[in-house]
Image: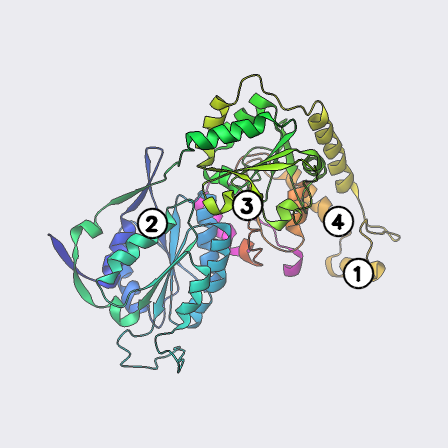
Amino acid sequence: MQTTRLTVAQALVQFLDNQYLDVDGKEIKFVHGVAAIFGHGNVLGIGQALAQNAGGLTLYQGRNEQGMAHLAMGFAKQNLRQRIIACTSSVGPGAANMVTAAATATANRIPLLLLPGDVFATRQPDPVLQQIEQPYDLSISTNDAFRAVSKYWDRVQRPEQLMSACINAFRVLTDPAETGAVTIALPQDVQAESFDFPNSFLQKRVHRLERTPPTTAMIKQAVTLIQTKKKPLIVCGGGVRYSQAGQILQKFAKQFGIPFAETQAGKSAVVSDHALNVGGVGETGCLAANRLAKEADLVIGIGTRYTDFTTSSKWIFQNPNVQFLNINVARFDAYKLDGVQLVADAKTALEALSQAIPTDYQAQWENEISQAKADFADEIQRLRAVQYHPDFTPEINDNLDHKAVHNEFIQLTGSQLTQTQVLGIVNETIDNNAIIVAAAGSLPGDLQRTWLSKGEETYHLEYGYSCMGYEVSAAVGVKIARPEQEVYALLGTALT
């Protein structure tokens, strides 16, 4: 066996530089770069290794650990989980600052590789700067906080362990059903230890984006269910975008006359003016989608987690005979709402269903789809025309002193524009392929309800964890991912 003697940090950097993802026969360099804030615990390990030979990796110097991790998440999300930026930090506060980003990535099923420095494996210098000491367990460090929010967690206590840690990390990062935050804690003394690493570990490694096909039994059960229903409604989730199934979704919907609604993650998989796209559904959904959702006797959820905002806490689907057909690569999600499970890649599943459903099957929505879209178009214009005035009363009239709030708003901003007015102006002004990024506050509601996506993959919302501040740093990651497109970060009410 041929080997190369390297430090653990050098071997890690070389390994990262040689990871590729095969997507439908096309090889993509999976790790684009490393975002880093160097300090106690990583500067003389990973920092030195990157300075000596970063290979094809691009180094991004962070200014805040949570921010750089959100940048990496925005990059991965906009790249449809096909490319990542790894993040490395120092031992204590730097590592802790990335815990929120780890939770955000895991909640949203976005690959995020975190490489925090850790305390000495030998324990000889303990307690080192930034070390937390727990008298009942000396093996605990700040990095144990990542366990609850990581899809894979490991600590490299010996050089030999780096190999299994990295291979398992990328097993999770490249798995559509299991991906999320992956944490490999790196004790600072181990980073500098040398070892004879097998060249096979360091060489180019190609992972495959497996398009899991549905079984014959799954397709048969799904087709049988669909044939018994008159008013099916598709819920287009983020899995449609990550599977790049937008085109086949349009074909499928048109073939059988089935309207489709959008979740926050699924929005802009297909442009808003498509004849069968009825817009956002659920608690922050729009008039058209929610009207049809109440009547649907079958909900075909494609790549959706069925969050409470999508289902209005399981209230929005009110037909007494409603059933669920769940198309999801993750078995966990396919079992939700006691639905019929079609555990498969979204694109592959839709292709199989298109061929299996009898050609004479048609949904029986009559003119309800076009009428709902027409009424929604009128509602959009009405909402964008609402203006503040001295006697203004909100449509949802609570116990706030609205006049005082209104006057304070004018005093602070010098404006009397409503949020829906502003969004309407921005929506009509920016380029059709411009990307908007948002996360928290009242904006996600107004955006899902009223934003009209004019280009595919132009709506970038983090609403799985609703992490305030994500939009600021993630927008930078989106711009790195799509340098040729304009990117706008929209800040929610709590940040303004």
Q: Nearer the viewer, residue 464 or 385?
A: 464
Instruction: Look at the numbered disc 4 and give the secondary structure of its residue.
Output: loop
* Magenta span: 472-496
The CA distance from mark 1 to mark 3 is 42 Å
The residue under label 2 is: 171
Q: Nearer the viewer, mark 4 or mark 2?
A: 2
The residue under label 1 is: 405
The residue under label 4 is: 418
1 and 2 marks in contact (CB < 8 Å)? no
Instruction: Look at the numbered disc 1 and give the secondary structure of its residue.
Output: helix
Q: Earlier along the polypeptide chain: callout 1 or callout 3?
A: 3
Q: Nearer the viewer, residue 121 or 147?
A: 147
Q: Residues within 10 Å of mark 4 (few under 14, many from 20)?
A: some
Instruction: Look at the numbered disc 3 and give the secondary structure of its residue.
Output: helix
Q: Earlier along the polypeptide chain: callout 2 or callout 3?
A: 2
The residue under label 3 is: 336
The C terminus lies in quadrant? bottom right
Please say whether residue 68 is visible from this viewpoint: no
Reply above or below: 368 against 432: above
Percent position of residue 12, x then y: 27, 58
